[in-house]
Image (spheres, rainbow, N blue to C red):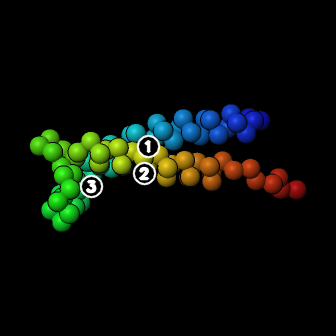
Amino acid sequence: MLGKAVKHGLITIASLFLGCIAGIIGAIVTWPFWGWFEKTTGIESLGHSGPADWVFAFMMGLAAVASFAALEWACRTRPAVR
């Protein structure tokens, strides 16, 4: 059985890895939303070759937090069934 610190460390590393991959994919998939967001707010969200750097960072952070919460929930200690 893994200790709590090791378990949380592995969950954190996995969340960062998954967050980077899912964030990149999410930023590309939501490209039309960022175009609408830029037109509506005037905040530059799309460059000439894709979403802006801050969009990638935002999506990666959002995905990392979501995957961390999901992994923590999935790996939480459950009482043994008798």
Q: CA distance from mark 2 to mark 3?
A: 13 Å
Q: Earlier in the sequence, mark 2 or mark 3?
A: 3
Question: Looking at this view, is 43 or 37 the one in front?
Answer: 43
Quarter of the rendering containing residue 30? bottom left
- Name the outermost residue toward the bottom: 40
Looking at the image, which residue is at 54% across and 35% down?
13
Q: Relative to 57, is 35 above or below?
A: below
Q: Is residue 78 left or right of residue 33?
A: right
Q: Is residue 46 left or right of residue 81?
A: left
Q: Secondary structure at mark 2?
A: helix
Residue depth check, mark 2 versus mark 3: number of the one nearer the observer: 2
CB atoms of marks 2 and 3 within 8 Å: no
CB atoms of marks 2 and 1 within 8 Å: yes
Question: Looking at this view, is 60 or 39 the one in front?
Answer: 39
Name the amino acid type tagged 1. Gly
Q: Position of residue 34 (x, y in %)?
A: 23, 56
Disc 1: which residue: 19
Q: Position of residue 60 (x, y in %)?
A: 39, 45
Callout 1 crowding tier (Cα within 10 Å): few <14, some 14–19, many ≥20: many
Looking at the image, which residue is at 54% across and 47% down?
68
Disc 3: which residue: 30
Residue depth check, mark 2 versus mark 1: number of the one nearer the observer: 2
